[in-house]
Amino acid sequence: MKSALTALGMLAELYFKRRPGCWKTPAVAVCLVLLAGLQAQDLQGHVSIILLGATGDLARKYLWQGLFQLYLDEVGKGYSFSFHGAALTSTKQGQEFVTKVLESLSCPEDVAPERCAELRGRFQQLSQYRRLRTSEDYMALSKDIEAQLQHEGLREAGRIFYFSVPPFAYADIARSMNSSCRPGPGAWLRVVLEKPFGHDRLSAQQLATELRSFFQEEEMYRVDHYLGKQAVAQILPFRDQNRKALDGLWNRHHVERVEIIMKETVDAEGRTSFYEEYGVIRDVLQNHLTEVLSLVAMELPYNVSSSGAVLQHKLQAFQALRGLHKDSAVLGQYQAYSGQVRQEQQKPDSFHSLTPTFAGILVHMDNLRWEGVPFILMSGKALDERVGYVRILFRNQAYCAQTEARWVADQSQCLPRQIVFYIGHGELGSPAVLVSRNLFRPSLPSESWKEVEGRPGLRLFGRPLSDFYAYSPVREQDAYSVLISHIFHGRKDSFITTENLLASWAFWTPLLDSLAYEAPRLYPGGAANGHLLDFEFTGTQVRFSQQQPEQLVPGPGSAPSPSDFQVLQSKYRDSPLISAWPEELIAKLADDIEATAMRAVRRFGEFHLALSGGSSPVPLFQQLATRHYGFPWAHTHLWLVDERCVPLRDPESNFQGLQAHLLQHVRVPYYNVHPMPVHLHQRLCAEEDQGAQMYASEISALVTNSSFDLVLLGMGTDGHTASLFPQSPAGLEGPQPVVLTRSPSKPHQRMSLSLPLINRARKVAILVMGRMKREITMLVSRVGHEPKKWPISGVLPSSGQLVWYMDYEAFLG
C-alpha cells in the first residue's frame, strides 16, 4: 500500500506543479476527484489464479498460454496478479515442468520481441508451482496468499480456481477449497470446470448437486471451449448488429436448413479409454454443437450484452428442441478403432466396440420460428478434412431468365444464399464470417474484424470466395485465452449454467439410451470413405445414402439379407400373423391402416383410429407422415388407447409423442384430435375429476356403437397391452369403457381403454417388435384366454378382426 500511495503522491505533485491554480476553490474539488480516480484505478485489487492440473496436457497446450495472455491484456490496468500452478506431482518435478512451459510462452505478433521477453519474465516471477493434495495444503496456500497481500499492502479482489482435472476429483478438491481456501469477505471466488460434465442426465444431476453443496451457481464457470472460438463468439453479436437485415430472414419461411459441422482427420488412438466411455455424441455433439445450435436458434434478447438474458433465451431454445429417436441418427466407426481399443485396453481378440466415432443427427425445433427447418449436426474422427463451420442455407425461390454465365454475385437471386460462421481450418484455414453477396452487406465491428483479401481459385461450399462478403479477425485468438478473459471479467454468457447443462442432457440422454446397442457403420477413414458416410433425411428420419451390406445372422457362411425374406403371412393364436423385417413390416402396417381408413371414409364418411403410445409405433407414425400423402386425414379422428398421468406437454406423454412424430406433419382438423383428459383442475388422474368417464362419454357421442374402426396395440415384455397390466383387475372386465390403472413402472398412474371396449373394434392390430419381445411372444403363443395373467391374451374382437404384426426378431429371435 505504501508504494502505491508514494506513486500516487508523485503523480499528484506533478499534476499540481503544472496546474498551480488547481488548489484554488472550486477547482480544488475537481483535483480531488481526479486524485480519487487515480487512487481507485491503482487499487482495484489483487487476483490469485490457481491452476489445478498444472502439469497436464490441457494446461501445457492452452491454459498457461491463456493465463499469460490475460496478464498481457490486463497489465497496467490496476490489478496485480499471482499465478499458482498446482498438481499431485512432486514440487521439484512440477516446478521443472512449469518452468519449461513458461519459457515457451508467446506474445501476439504486434508485441515487439524485447517487450515480449520482458513481459514473459515478469509473468514467470509471478508464477510458482506447489503440490496440492490435502486440506492442509489448501490451508497453507490460503495463508501464503494472505501473507502476500499483507506484506505488499494489497486488497484482495478475488481468486480463480481452474479445475483442469478429471471430474471424479472435483468433490475432494471442492471440499478442501471450500473449507480452507476461500477468499476473505468482499472478494469474489470463480471456480472453472472442464468437461465432461457427466455421462447422462442422471450423472450430470448428481455431479451438479455435489458441486452445489460447495459453490454457488454464480461462482461456477463450466467451460465449453467452442464458445471461445472467434467465429462462434461472433454469432450473437452478428445477429444483433444485423437485426434489420435478418429480422425477415431468420425463420422457417426463408431458412432451408442449418448445418453445424465439426470434422477431424485424427483418430482416437491414445485416447480410447476416454472415447470408449463417451463416444462422439457425448464428446462433441451434446456440448459443442448443441451450444452452437442454441446461439443460432435462440430468440435474440433485446440486450445481447446481458448475460442473464442470453442464458435465459438459450434455455428456452433447449426447451423447444423436439425429442430425438433412433431414426434421428446415423452412426459410424472407423475400421481401425476396435483394434486400437483391444491394444490399448488389453481386450481379447474377439472384442468389437459399438462406440461411434462418427454421428450425423437430425434435429428439429417445436416453435414458430423454426418449425420444419432441419438442423444437421455432424462430427467424426478419421474423416477427409479438418474443418468446423455453421452454415445457414436460405431458400431460393427465384428463377433467372439469363444463363448462369451472366449471373452477377451481388445481383442474381438464383445463386445460393447463405451465411457461414467458419470456425477454422479447412480450405480457408482461419476463422471467418461469410455472407452471400446476393443477401446483404453485413455489419461487423471494424476494430476486430476485417475484410478477407481475394484468393483466386478458392471455392467454399461450391462457390468462389468472391461470391461472399468475407471477414476474418484482425487478430486471431485462442479459444481458451478468450474464455479466461471472460472468467476474469465475470462474463457468464460464455459458459454453461447448471440449468442449461441439465436441459441439454435431458435432450440427448433418450437418444443415447436408444442407440446403446446399435452397431455403427464401419468406414476406412480419410479420403477412402468416399460416399460411405453421406446421409439424407426425410421428415424426421435420417439414413445413409448408400446401403452397406450388413451381417444379420452371425456365424459361418453367407448371412441372409432382408431381400432374402418377403412379408410372411401365417397364424398366431388362431389369428392372422404378418411377419417381416422392421422396415417392410412398418410399411405393410401403414398400407393396411390407409386401406382401412379409405374403406371407412367411403362407407361412413369418417375413420376412427385409436393409437397406443410407447416407442414401437414411432416408426409407423413417421411412415404415415412422410409416405402416405393420400391418407384421408381430413376425415380421420385420432384417439388414444392409453395415456400416462403426466401433463400433455411432458416428454413422457403418449400424446406428446403422437404430436411430435405424426400430428405436426399431417393436416388433421384440431377438433378430430382427442387426447385423454388426464390433467384436469391442475391435478393428474384424480378420481373425483372423472376424466375416465369424460373420455368414455366423448367416445360414446362420436363413435358409432363405441366401435373404433381400428385400434393399434402393442405387447409388453410382461404381457400387458394398452395400460392393462397383469395382476391388476382394472379394465379387464366390467362396464367401464375407460379406466384408471396402475403401472409397475413410473409414472405409475395411467388411463386406458378397457378390454371390453377394445374388443368392440372393427379391427385390432397388435404391433410387436424387437428381440426383447421374443420370450413373451413364445409364452403368449402357448397360453389360453388368461387376461388376469396375460392381458394381451384377452384381446379378441367380438365381431371384428385381429391381426398380429411381428418383426422377425420378435417372432424368430
Image: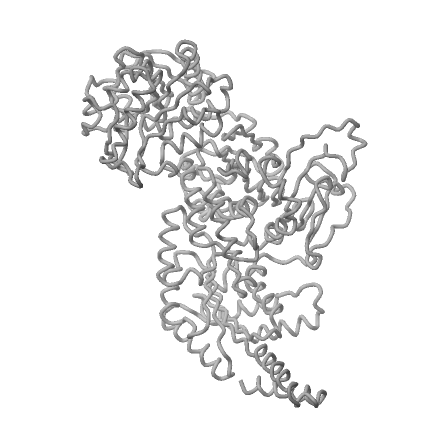
| Above-or-below relation of 307 to 374 | below
User: Which sits in the foreground, 81 or 8?
Assistant: 8
User: Which sits in the foreground, 91 or 109?
Assistant: 109
Q: Position of residue 581 (x, y in %)?
A: 42, 20
| Above-or-below relation of 766 to 171 | above
Q: Is residue 561 visible?
A: no
Residue closest to the far top = 603
Q: Residue at x 19, y 29 (%)?
A: 728
In the rendered view, does 250 fall on the left or right side of 325? right
The quarter holding residue 219 reads bottom left
Q: Residue at x 25, y 23 (%)?
A: 737
The quarter holding residue 120 reads bottom right
| Above-or-below relation of 683 to 74 | above
User: Which sits in the foreground, 519 or 224?
Assistant: 224
Q: Quadrant of the C terminus?
A: top left
User: Which sits in the foreground, 576 or 137?
Assistant: 576
Q: Position of residue 233 (x, y in %)?
A: 59, 53
Q: Residue at x 45, y 36 (%)?
A: 324
In the rendered view, does 769 fall on the left or right side of 281? left
Residue closest to the far right = 406
| Above-or-below relation of 352 to 153 | above
Q: Position of residue 535 (x, y in %)?
A: 56, 31
Q: Position of residue 615 (x, y in %)?
A: 38, 30
Q: Residue at x 45, y 79 (%)?
A: 146
Q: Is residue 169 visible?
A: yes
The quarter holding residue 186 reads bottom left
